[in-house]
Amino acid sequence: MNQQVKEFEHQMPHRTIRLAAAVVATISLFAVSACGGRAGGAGGTAQPPATAGSSAPADSSGSGPRVPSPLPTKDLIANPCSVLNASEAEQVGLKYPGEKSTGVLNGCRWTSSGSNLNFVNNTPIEQNKHGISDIYDQKAQQAYFEPTTINGYPAVFAATRDSRSNGICTLWVGVTDQLAVSVLPNISIGSNKKDPCGIAKKFATAMIGHLQGAS
């Protein structure tokens, strides 16, 4: 298995998502390289994470915070590239449209408007049936775990390998209590390589704003 696939697997919690050999072709479009990629010319500064309790009331059916109001997910699941329109993509420094991948994990790769080496991936994780609670359940296995919120929606920076110094930061956003979306910037060049989590949050903010407008 190549280095790109190995790196991607370390970013994804494995209790409910098991990336077998058959998934390799599926994730090749948005696999994480060791050096990462950049979310366009967009800037962004990571904000201090909130406490888990400040996101939303605890979900009685899971360990994570509850979503305040479920967002529409039909289009998101059918086409993950539908989470940004042309204007929204331009505002966060990305080319429109995004490039969709299909398979076990359906995602969208958004290439930087400033460099083809840099991109952001968003992936609705349908395999995790308890949304962000499935990420909270694996807190002890994560190299970093920093809860935050996106437009009032529960989110957490978390990954089993800490590659933030290499321009890679994984952000999980709860859009319903049954579905979380992974936002994964890959920053290889430019000043944003120092702040991949800020880029993840900027993309997620645009994504949640788009979904709120569609609800």
Image (cartoon, rainbow, N blue to C red):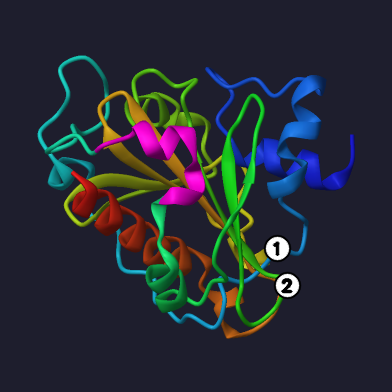
| Residue 164 visible, this orientation | yes
Q: Nearer the viewer, residue 182 or 53?
A: 182
User: In the picture provided, is 214 more to the left or to the right than 204?
Assistant: left
Residue 74 highlighted magenta (yes or no): yes
Q: Which residues are magenta?
A: 72-82
Mark closer to the chain start, 1 or 2: 1
Q: Position of residue 36 (x, y in %)?
A: 70, 63
Task: Tell me the residue that label 2 is attached to.
Answer: 116
Q: Secondary structure at mark 1?
A: loop
Q: Nearer the viewer, residue 84 or 201?
A: 84
Eyeballing the image, is 63 above or below 157?
A: above
Q: Nearer the viewer, residue 43 or 29?
A: 29
| Residue 144 visible, this orientation | no
Q: Nearer the viewer, residue 79 or 162?
A: 79
Q: Position of residue 66 (x, y in %)?
A: 18, 32
The label number, if any, that marks residue 36 in the structure image: 1
Asked whether the residues under the numbered discs 1 and 2 touch, taking CB atoms below 8 Å apart as contact, a structural biologist would say no
Q: Residue at x 44, y 74 (%)?
A: 92
